[in-house]
Each structure stands twice: as structure tokens, then as C-alpha cells.
Amino acid sequence: MSGRRVVIREPYAVTCEEYEVGRPGSGQVIVETEASAISPGTELAIYTGIHQWLSDPSRAWPRFPCVPGYSAVGRVLEVGEGVHSYRPGARLIWDGRHASHALVDVASPGALVYPISEHVPARAAALAALARFPLTAVVRAGEVLGQSVAVLGLGLIGQLALRLFSAAGAYPLFGLDPVPFRRRMAERVPGARALDPGRPGVLDGLREINSGERPDVVVDATGNPDAVRQAMALVADGGRVIMVGSPRGIASEVDFYHDLHGRSISLVGAHGSALGVAPREKFPFVRERAMRLLIHLLESDRLGADELVTHHVRATELREMYEGLLHDKEHFLGVTLHW
């Protein structure tokens, strides 16, 4: 069987090509993709050639030529020997690349493969595997019920983080982003207010809404390493700054004495490494639990994920989508490819 897939051959060079899918082996299924979601931070870093792992010899992915993507929804076409958990026609989500078909190993104990209901729109279901990354911000924040939370950076990851904190019972919620469209999208979340972080008096504005207090938790979802300075400046004394935006680069002019140490702030990293297959001493929350929760939130439409997808397009339009995400933030937010 032949399929189609996206390939980034070098920075800014995106093509769509045919490839041979193969037949399912023992413990494998062939999945026909309904939709795959763009991970804006990771994929734009690959597309522009700045991803740290491109030059890391210890990493097998990404490498040019690269098939990007890691979040998809599709249907089982054929099952291999020993597969009893899925039948042809079953709908599932998995950490799929931007390709029309995939050989998926469903028998591996660490496989990220889960069924999802028929009523969830493909463009929303395609976000499931991607959404585990902003979920780590909630996991790593610890106690969030009734806590005031500000999310700095309202791209797709920040928007999902805001909705996940809302589902977890955080209140009040704040979204901070210079783009008016993204602020309007954030204010669709019950209990959320949005502010422009570049305007004078943003801290006073937060305090005015938050009964005179700074937020208990500030989530940095910008991907900009220098944003940590503003995140630390906004959070309450003894509060938590959660870094979920995969900052690429080196932060400059961070005053750790006054801004971190002097105010006893906790600066916490939150990435996929926090959600392992098995519980660990410092990371008891496992991926199985995370994915079950995310699928429940998608099936019950508590995330409003469908409205975050501004573009649902053919794979041949991927380069235009990357350029839009880079340069037209007033109109581009979430992007999914339909196959």
C-alpha cells in the first residue's frame, strides 16, 4: 500500500511525497489518518532550523529529512497477528506523524494509542496527544483548586493550558498575550480575563482583578526564554512559575537574587518527561492516567478544543500554515491537516 506524507528536507523546504506503508507485523495495525495536528513550537523550530535536537548527536529525531508531527486521529484498516484490542474500523488517537497512513505498534506497553468516540470532531481529536504537554503544567503545579493562575503566551499550548487549569478548578484565570485575537479566544474560558502583557501597568491590572493579589501560579507558554523575567515578576511571593513553552535559547538579564531567591519563588519545568509510562519517585503521574483524562475532556467537550483550530487544511498546504503561524498570529492558532 502506498501513502502520502509530509517531509521537511531542510529549513523552510516542505514537500508532500508518496511512500510505501508496508503490512502490519505482529502486534501492529495499519491506521488510515483522519487528521493530524501541528505542534507549533516543535514543528516551527524544525521548519526554521533552530530546534536544539537537530544538532544533538544523541538524538535520532528530528533529523533532516524529517517527517514532522506527533498527534493524530484515524481508523484501523488492518490488524496484524496477535492484535485483539482493535478491529478494522476502530477509531483511535496516537502519536502520529503527518502522513496518510501509519504502522502503529499497539502491543508495546509504552504505546501511546487510545480509542476515542465517534462524536469528537477529527480536528479536535487530533489534538489529544499534543495536549499532554500543556497538561504537564497542571500536573507540575501541584495544588490548583481555587488557585489564581495566569498563562503567559496564548498560542495553542497556552490556550490548552488555560482550559486545562479551568477544568482542574483553578480560579480566577488570566491570559496574557499581545495579540488581540488570542486574548478574545482566552476570554471564552469561564472565569478567564485577558490582558496585554506589553501594556504599562499589567501587574496592577492583574491585582485589580485578583482582589489585590498577584497570581499564585504563572505558566510561561511563550517559548521565549526571556519571558521568564516577566513570569517571575508577576507571580506571588512563594508562588510557582511553570515553564511549559519549550523555551529555545538562553535567557538574559535574569536577576535570580531579587526575582527568584529573594521572593522564594519556585521555578518548575514541565514537559513530556514528567509523564512517564510507570510511576517514578518524583513523577508519580503517569501517561496512561493523563491520556484517559484528556480523552474524557475531549469527549465531554470541556476543553472547547474544536474552536482552537482556525485552519483544517490539506497536507499540501502545510508550508503556508507554517508561514501563517510564524507571521500572522491574528488569524492562525491551531492547525490540523485532513487526509
Image (tube, rainbow, N blue to C red):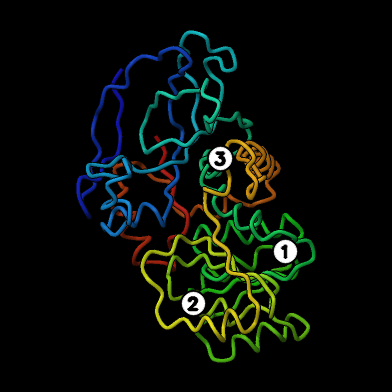
Asked whether the residues under the numbered discs 3 and 1 touch, taking CB atoms below 8 Å apart as contact, a structural biologist would say: no
The CA distance from mark 3 to mark 2 is 28 Å
Q: Which residue is mark 1?
A: 190
Where does residue 208 sit, x and y in percent of width and height? 72, 86
Return the mark for residue 244.
Answer: none
Where does residue 222 sit, x and y in percent of width and height? 47, 67
What's the residue type where badge 3 is placed?
A: Ala
- For mark 3, does the 10 Å Cα neighbourhood hold few (<14), some (14 to 19), or many (20 or more) residues? many
Dividing the picture into quadrants, the one containing residue 6 is top left
Where does residue 172 sit, x and y in percent of width and height? 74, 71
Furthest residue to the bottom? 200
- Residue drawn at x 74%, y 63% is 170
Which element carries disc 3, helix, strand or loop? helix
Q: Is residue 104 above or below residue 166?
A: above
Q: Which residue is mark 2?
A: 178
What's the residue type where badge 2 is placed?
A: Pro
Furthest residue to the front? 281
